[in-house]
């Protein structure tokens, strides 16, 4: 059955791959992105910053006017800032949390009244393996994804009775434009203590990302969730090693897990 789907961050990476796959399956897809883009087949791109509630309200109202409903929301928009937590500026923190977490919250609050009225809908939020464990020198990225985890779990309990499902996808390392667009803290790079360690950790992070899975793998997982009547609350999508790290996190003590992360990222 054809569904009306909103995907944020649809201009590249996961968002674009997912929009293209779902459109190829005959769904009506609205891709939200910060820069203007021409329509492509069943994909209609809408310029919208997920941090701007007024823009979101206008776009969602227009979609409702055109389609009469929103069946699925995929909250994919996100970005990363690398650096030491101690040295992060207020602007960097606001940008990281505002885009990844509040962007997700803003979109959910915009579509939920329509889904609740229809007594049906699916919300799929992009979390991360970094939302399951705190990654060194990506601390506020992890914090934003941890926030999505708690928000999504609570939201699922609140709206399940209205016929609305909430799911999280937890990707591991993928080869997307995310690596190249990461903003790195200059204060951290310049710091005599943190700088050398950060550069060493960053080299490992970028190597793993550039050698990661293709975004189409994640797109297929999201498409399956769109089609499932009862999609899972959480789904890890990664290579076997990273899937095992999530399992290991559940059995190790906190200090043991920190030791593993320090060893892996050479921090």
Image (tube, grey):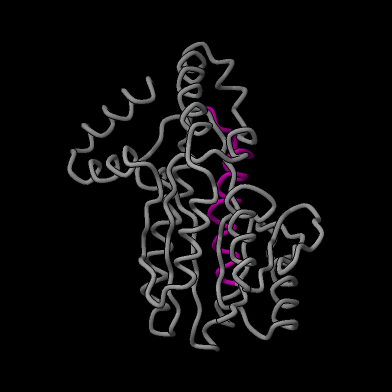
| Residue at the spot 60% in from the left edge and 28% down from the top edge | 184
- The C terminus lies in which quarter of the figure? top left
Residue 125, relative to residue 83: is it above or below?
Answer: below
Q: Is residue 179 above or below residue 13?
A: above
Please tell me whether residue 65 is drawn above or below residue 248 in the rendered image.
Answer: below
Please say whether residue 98 is one of the residues in the magenta stretch: yes
Number of disc labels: 0
Identify the residue shown where x is 66% and y is 48%.
12
- Foreground residue among 163 and 21: 21
* 241 part of magenta stretch: no
Q: Is residue 24 left or right of residue 188?
A: right
Residue nearest the viewer, comparing 15 with 167: 15
The residue that appears at 50% across and 64% down in the rendered structure is: 223
**Which residue range is magenta in the image?**
87-109
Image quarter (top left, top right, bottom left or bottom right) of the N terminus: bottom right
The secondary structure that most of the magenta stretch takes on is helix
Residue 2 in percent (x, y) is at 59, 79
């Amino acid at each position: 059955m054809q569904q009306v789907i909103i995907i944020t961050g649809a201009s590249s990476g996961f968002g674009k791959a997912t929009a293209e796959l779902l459109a190829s399956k005959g769904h009506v897809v609205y891709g939200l992105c910060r820069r203007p883009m021409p329509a492509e087949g069943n994909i209609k791109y809408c310029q919208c910053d997920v941090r701007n509630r007024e823009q979101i309200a206008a776009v969602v109202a227009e979609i409702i006017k055109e389609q009469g409903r929103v069946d699925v929301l995929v909250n994919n928009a996100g970005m990363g800032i690398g650096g030491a937590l101690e040295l992060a500026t207020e602007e960097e923190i606001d940008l990281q949390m505002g885009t990844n977490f509040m962007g997700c919250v803003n979109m959910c609050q915009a579509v939920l009244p329509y889904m609740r009225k229809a007594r049906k809908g699916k919300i799929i939020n992009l979390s991360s393996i970094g939302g399951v464990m705190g990654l060194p020198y990506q601390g506020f990225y992890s914090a934003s994804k941890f926030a999505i985890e708690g928000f999504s779990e609570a939201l699922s309990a609140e709206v399940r009775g209205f016929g609305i499902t909430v799911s999280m996808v937890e990707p591991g390392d993928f080869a997307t434009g995310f690596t190249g667009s990461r903003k790195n803290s200059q204060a951290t790079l310049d710091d005599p203590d943190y700088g050398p360690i950060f550069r060493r950790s960053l080299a490992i992070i970028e190597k793993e990302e550039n050698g990661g899975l293709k975004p189409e793998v994640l797109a297929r997982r999201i498409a399956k969730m769109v089609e499932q009547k009862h999609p899972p609350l959480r789904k890890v999508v990664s290579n076997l090693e990273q899937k095992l790290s999530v399992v290991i996190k559940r059995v190790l003590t906190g200090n043991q897990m920190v030791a593993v992360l320090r060893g892996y990222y050479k921090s």
